[in-house]
Amino acid sequence: EAPISGGVSELLIKCVRNQGPSTTKILFKTAQNEGGSVWKAIIKAVCDVDIEISSPAANLLREMSKSDKMVASKFYNDKMIYAAIQPSQFTETRLRILELGAALSVATAAANDDDGPKEYLKSDLFREVLSIVESGPDSLDPLMWPNALQILGEVMRTAIGFQKVFYGTNDGGGVFHRLLLKKKMMAVADKLNLVHHLGLSARRSQQLDWITILSPYYCCRDNNNNNEKTTLHQNIDSCSNSSGNGSSEANAYKRDHCNVELLKAAMKSCEEGLLENDNETVKAMAAHGVCLLATCLKDALLLLHRPFKNQKASLSSSSNNVSPMMINNSSNSIRGSRVGGHVTTTATALTNEEKETKNADENNNHQHQQQQLYKMLRKGLFLVARVAGERTSSGQAKVASLVGLANVVGNSYEEEQQTVINQHHQHQHQQEEEKEQQLKTRRNMILNVEEAASAVDDLHAAIVNRVGMRSLVNAIQSPFADVAAAGYTLLRNAATHGWGLEAISVTPGLMETLLDREKGAGSSQKACEWRFAVLQALHMTLKRYNGAERYIDGSTRERLAEFVRQGPYYKERGAPQVKVATATR
C-alpha cells in the first residue's frame, strides 16, 4: 500500500524497455491480482499532491502504455482518477493527471494504434480538458487555462486527436473556431496562444488540409470533369438542398467556410499583436503566429509531394520582385473547397443566362474573399519582416521574427528529404490503390501544385528582401548571441535557394565578411559553426544552379570551396586548429 518509490519505478521501467510487451503484460496482470492492490497503490501515488510521489508512478504508466494500450484504458476509466480531476481538487494535481492522460494517448498512438487515442477521446479526462479550455481564460485560475491549452495541444499530436478537437462533432468547427470567432473580449495574448497551439499541433500531426485554403491556385474541381469548376457557395447550396444529413462533400464545404473565418480571425489577432508597441512579448508571439501559419502552408505543399528536379535549375533573374499571388485570369480565378468525390448539382428553373450571371457573381464574391484572406497573410509576413529588419531592436520580438521567417523560408535541401520521407511513409502504410486515390484527392485541392509552390517561393524572396540584407549583416554581427544565431539561421536558409544566392552575392561586403576567418562575423566557436553553415549552403547551391557565375566570380568560388573543405575551425598561417569538445551541442 506504500507509494511506489523512484528506485522501484526506474527498475520496472528498465525491465519494460529491455524485455518488451511481454513484460508489460505480466506486470499489468500482477498489478491487478489480489483485488488490484498494486494498481490502486500506483493510482494513489499518481493522485498524490507531492510531485516526488506522483512522478515515479506516472513515468511507469507512460512506459507501460507504449506497449499495452489496456494500461491507458484502465487509467482513463479509474474511479480514483475521475475523483481527482474534479474542480474541487488541488489545481496542480488536476493538471498533472490531465497531462498524464494526454501523454498516455500519445504513447498508445506511437504503436500506430488508433484504438488507444479513441479510448482517450471518449474519456472523462478529455471532456474535462475540453471544458476547461472552452470556458476561456477569464473564468478560471490564471494557471489553469494556458496549461489546459497546452494539454489539448498534446492531445492534438495524433491525427485522430487533431480532427476531434479541430472539427468537433458538428460542421460549425471545434473549440478553436468557437474561441477565436465568438470570444470577442478575449485578450490578444490569449488568442495568440490559441494560434500557436493550433499551428504547432497541425505540423506535428501533419493534419494540414484546413490550411490549404490559404494557398494561391486553390480551387474546387469535379473529378468526373476536370474542366468543370464550382465555387464554395454553389456547392453548399446544392448539397443543402439534398435530403438527409447531407453528403460528405457538403460537410467539407461547410468546414472550409468555417476555416476561412477562423484563419481571418487568427491573422487579425496576429496583426493586432504586431502593431502592439508597448509589449515585446505579445509582439514576439504575434510574429511567431504569422510565421507558424505560413510554415503550415509550406508543409501542406510538401505533403502534396511537390517534386524537385535533380538536374541543375536555372537561376531566376527576378527573384527580388514580388510575384502577383492573385490570379487575374478568369479561367484560374475560381476558388472553392476541397473535393473528395463527385459533386452533384441540383436542377433549377433558372435560364442558362441567369445561371451564368449567378455563377459569375458567386465566383467573384468568393474570389474576393480568397484574395482578402491571402492578402492578410502577406501583410502579416511583411509586418514580421519589418520587425526583423529594425536595426535598433535586439529584443525577443526581433529574435522571434528572424527565427520565424527562417522557418517560413525553409531549408530547400531538408524539404526535399522530407518529400522523400513523406513518399516512403505513404508507401509503407497504404495500399497502392488507397495511396493513388489520396494523392488524386489532395492534388484536386490545388490546380497546379508546382505553380503554387513557385508563387510561394517568390513570396519568400520578397520577405527576405523586405527584411533587408544590410539588416541581416547587422544581425549576424550583433554582440547578442541569440540575435546573431537568429540572423545566421535566416541567412543559411535563404542561401539554400537560388534567389538567396543572388541576394547574398550582390550585397556589398557580405561574402568578404563570411569568408574572413579572423575579422569576420565573430570568432567564437558558435560563430564559426553558424558561418560555416551559411557558406556550406552557398557552396551546395552554387553546384545546383546554372548561371551562378554571373553573381560570384571564379576566385570567390575557389575561396568558398576551400573554406568548406577546411571546415569551420581552420586557422590560417599554420596556427593550430581550435580544439572542440566532442560532446553534442
Image (tube, rainbow, N blue to C red):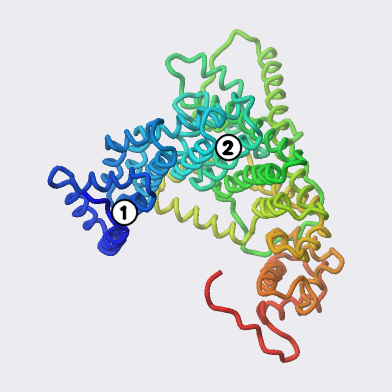
Circle 2 is placed at which residue position?
A: 194
Q: Where residue 257 sits: x, y (%)?
A: 59, 26
Q: Secondary structure at mark 1?
A: helix
Residue furthest out toward the right: 508
Asked if 440 appears above or below 498 in the picture, the reply is above
Count neighbours of disc 2 (C-alpha within 10 A) and say few if under 14, some if 14 to 19, many if 20 or more. Answer: many
Residue furthest out toward the bottom: 574
Residue 99 image-quadrant placement: top left
Q: Amino acid at mark 1?
A: Leu
Q: Secondary structure at mark 2?
A: helix
Q: Is residue 371 left or right of residue 447?
A: right
Residue 267 image-quadrant placement: top right
Q: Where residue 343 sits: x, y (%)?
A: 52, 25
Q: Is residue 111 left or right of residue 366?
A: left
Q: Is residue 345 left or right of residue 245?
A: right
Asked if 360 appears above or below 137 in the picture, the reply is above
User: Residue drawn at (34%, 36%), measured in percent from left and top?
Assistant: 84
User: Residue drawn at (71%, 16%), measured in percent from left and top?
Assistant: 357
User: Residue drawn at (58%, 34%), measured in percent from left and top?
Assistant: 226
Depth check: 124 or 163 in front? 124
Count neighbours of disc 1 (C-alpha within 10 A) and say few if under 14, some if 14 to 19, many if 20 or more. Answer: many
Is residue 211 in view? Answer: no
Q: Where residue 107 sits: x, y (%)?
A: 37, 49
Q: Amino acid at mark 2?
A: Leu
Depth check: 266 or 315 in front? 266
Q: Is residue 320 left or right of residue 432?
A: right
Circle 1 is placed at which residue position?
A: 60
Depth check: 502 or 446 in front? 502
Depth check: 24 or 420 in front? 24
